[in-house]
Amino acid sequence: MRVAAIVSPQAVSFGMIQTMDVAARCRNLRKTYDGKVEAVRGLDLEILTGECFGLLGPNGAGKTTTIEILEGLLPQTSGEVEILGKTWNAHSRELREVLGVSLQETRLPEKLTVRETLKLFASFYHYSRSTLEVMEEMELTDKANSWVEKLSGGQRQRLAVATALVANPKILFLDEPTTGLDPQSRRQLWDIIHQFQRRGGTVLLTTHYMDEAERVCNRVAIIDHGRAIASGTPSELIEELGGQQMVEFEATGNCWGASDVWRSLPGVETVHVEDGRVMLSVRETHETIPDLLAALQKSGARLLRLTTRQASLEDVFVRLTGRHLREE
Amino acid sequence: MNTPNLEHETDVASAQDAKTPAISTENGRWAGYRQLVMARMKEMWREPEVIFWVFVFPILLALGLGIAFRNRPADVHRVAIVAGEGAAQALDLLKASLQKGSVRTDELPAADAFNQFRLGKYDLVVTPKAGSGFEYRYDPVRPESVLARTVVNDAMQAAAGRKDALQVSTKASSQPGARYIDFLIPGLLGMNLMNSGMWGIGFALVQMRQRKLLKRFVATPMRRGDFLLGLASSRLGLMLIELALLLGFGVVVFQMRVMGSWVSVILISAAGALSFGGLGLLTASRAQKTETVSGLINVVMMPMWMFSGVFFSYERFPAIIQPFVKLLPLTALNDALRATILGGASLATQRTRLLVLLLWGAVSYLLALRWFRWT
C-alpha cells in the first residue's frame, strides 16, 4: 500500500505529459512464457521524445522482456505497444529503419573487423551514416582493422552500440549496456548516450545499476516482478522517500529492535533495519544526529559506526521492496 | 595505416559535434545481400579449422587412400613345403615358377609350416603325401590363399606334363577409370559437399542463434530472404573451390580422367551443395545450442557415411536394403557424380538421381522455413 502512495503522484504527472511528444508507449503490457511464467504483469510506460528513460530493476524483474517487446523482437501476450505512433504489426519494416538496438550479450562475429562489422550492419538500412564518422564518435577508429575477437569488453560494447548508431536511429534501445564493464568504459558509454541525446535522439535503457540510472536517465521506472512500482525523475523518486539524506549506524546492544525510538527522532522519515545496521532517511542530517547520539547514550549502547550520505535510487528500491537491487 | 585520412575525419566530426549527423550513404536493394555474402566468406577464410576440414582434409584422405590401395602387380605367392620325402620333387616341379619370381618357397617341418600359415606368413602349405601326390592346405576366405592354390597347382600340373586343351592368349590392360582412386574421388567429393553443407549451414546458424546474432540481425531491416540467399550463395562459391581442388588433385596426382562434361559435374555438385544446405538449415531450425546441433548433424550424416558408397560400393549390402540406400541424398549425389565423371554420362540420364537429391533439398527447405527460429 506504500507502493500505491508512491505511484499515485506520478499518475498526475503522466496526465500532463500526454500533451507532449511520445516516442514509445505501452499500456497494460503483459507477457506470459509457456502459459506459466509471468514476466511482465501489466506495465504502462511512456517514453518522451528526446529523453533518456531507464528501466531500473533487479535481475529477473522483466526488464529485458519489456524492452524486447518494445523492440518488436518478442510478441506480447496482451496490451498495446506503440512506437513513434505506429504498431509493430502494421509497420514493422518502417520501424526497423529508424530504431537502433543493442541487445544484452550479443556476440558479434569474432573474425570480422570493426569496420567490416559496421559496414555489414549499415548495409541493412536504406539510409545509413558514414562508418568512419561512427567509429570516430565511438572512439573505435584505432581498432578499425582489428578483429572483434581482439577487442576488450568496453570496445565490444561500444561496437555493439555503434552497430545501432550507423542506422542514424530516432530511438536507441540499450539492454544492460554497461553490465560487466570497468568504470572508465561505463563513463565512456554514458557520454555516448548524452551525445546521442544532444542530437535529439530518444534512449530507452535497462539497468540494474542505480548510479547509472541516476547519472544517465531523465526519468526512470523501477520494475519489480513485472510491474512498475515507481516512476519519475531520479530526484523526484528520492524526494518521495521523504528525506534526501541517509544516516546509517551500528551500535552494541539490541538497538535495532527499537524502530519506534528511531522513528520518533526529529527529522526522521523512514527507518529500515538490515543485518544489525539501522538506516534512517532524514530531512536534514544535523537535525537528527545530536538526538540520535543522545538516545544511544541513554540506552547505554556504544556506537560502532555512523555514516551519512545522500539518498539514492537504491534506497528508494530498498524502501519499496525491502530488498536490494543487486541481491543474488 | 591510413592515419592522415582519419585525422582529417576527426576534425570534421568534432566540428559537427552535437549536430545531426549527415546521412552519407543510400544503400541499394542488394547492399545487405552483398555484405552478408562477403562477411560470410571472410569469416570462413579467417577460420583455419574450416580451411583444413573443407579443403585440406579431403585431399589428404584421397592421397592416403589412393596410395594405400594403389593397384600393384600381383604379389609373390608364399608357399610352405613340409620337409620330408617328396619335398624335393615339389621344388623341382615349381622350378619354372621360382625362376619367374611368382612363387617363393620355404621348406620347414609340418608343425612350423601350419603354425605360420595360420599366422598369415604363408598363403599355401604343400604336404607331400606318402607314396605320391601332394596335399594343399589353403584358406578359402583369403583371396591370396585361393589364388596361390590355383597358381601352384597349375604350375605343378604343367611341369608334370599336363597339356592345355584350349589355345588362349592374354593381353594386360590397366587404364585410369577402373582404379580405386577413380572410384574414391567422386565419393569424397560427394561426402565433402555433404559435410560442408551440414556444418557450414547447420552449425553456423545455430552458433549465430546461440550468440544472439540472428536476433540482432532481425532487429535491423535486413531482409530474411537475403540472409538465407547469402548463405546459399557463399555455399555455392565454396562448392566450386572444393570441386576444383579435389578433382584437380585427382587429375594432376593420379592422372584421373573426367569423362563427362565439366558443366554437368558443376551442376550436379551445385544441386548437392544446395540440397545438403537445405538439410543443414532443417537440422538448425530449432536447436538453441551448438552441442545439440552437432549431435543432430551426426545422426543425419551417419547412415550416409555407411550406406551411400563413399569408400566402397553399396552393392555389397543385401539386396533388400538397396532401394532405401538409393533414396539417400548422398547415394544419389555419389552415383550421379560417378556416372558423369567416370562414365561420361549426360545430365539427362541422371535426372532420377537429381530429382531424389533436389526433393530432399526442397522438402527440407520448406520445413525449415516453417520451423525456423530467429531468436
Image (cartoon, coloured by chain):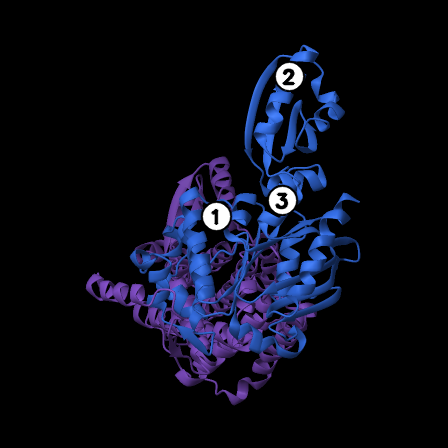
Chain colours: A blue, B purple
Callout 1: residue from which chain? Answer: B
Return the x and y of residue B307 as percentages of the image width and height: 59, 64
Outermost residue to the left? B4
Q: Which mark identifies residue A303?
A: none
Callout 2: residue from which chain? Answer: A
Where is mark 1, residue-wise? B126
What residue type is disc 2 on?
Answer: Ala
Quarter of image, res B352: bottom right
What residue type is disc 1 on?
Answer: Val
**Mark positioned earlier in the residue sequence (3 or 2):** 3
Callout 3: residue from which chain? Answer: A
Q: Are both tags, 3 and 1, on one chain?
A: no
Return the x and y of residue A320 as percentages of the image width and height: 71, 42
| The N terminus of chain A lies in quadrant | top right
Where is mark 3, residue-wise? A239
Disc 3: CA contacts within 10 A as few (<14), some (14-19) or many (>=20): some
Quarter of image, res B283: bottom right
Relative depth, front residue between A255 and A244:
A244
Task: Please give the name of the residue rendered at 45% of the width and 71% of the height, measured from the top-left corner.
Answer: B36
User: Please, is residue B155 above or below residue B328 in the view?
Assistant: above
Disc 3 is placed on an element classified as: helix
Disc 2 is placed on an element classified as: helix
Disc 2: CA contacts within 10 A as few (<14), some (14-19) or many (>=20): few
Q: Which mark identifies residue A294?
A: 2
User: Please, is residue B325 above or below residue A219 in the view?
Assistant: below
Disc 1 is placed on an element classified as: strand
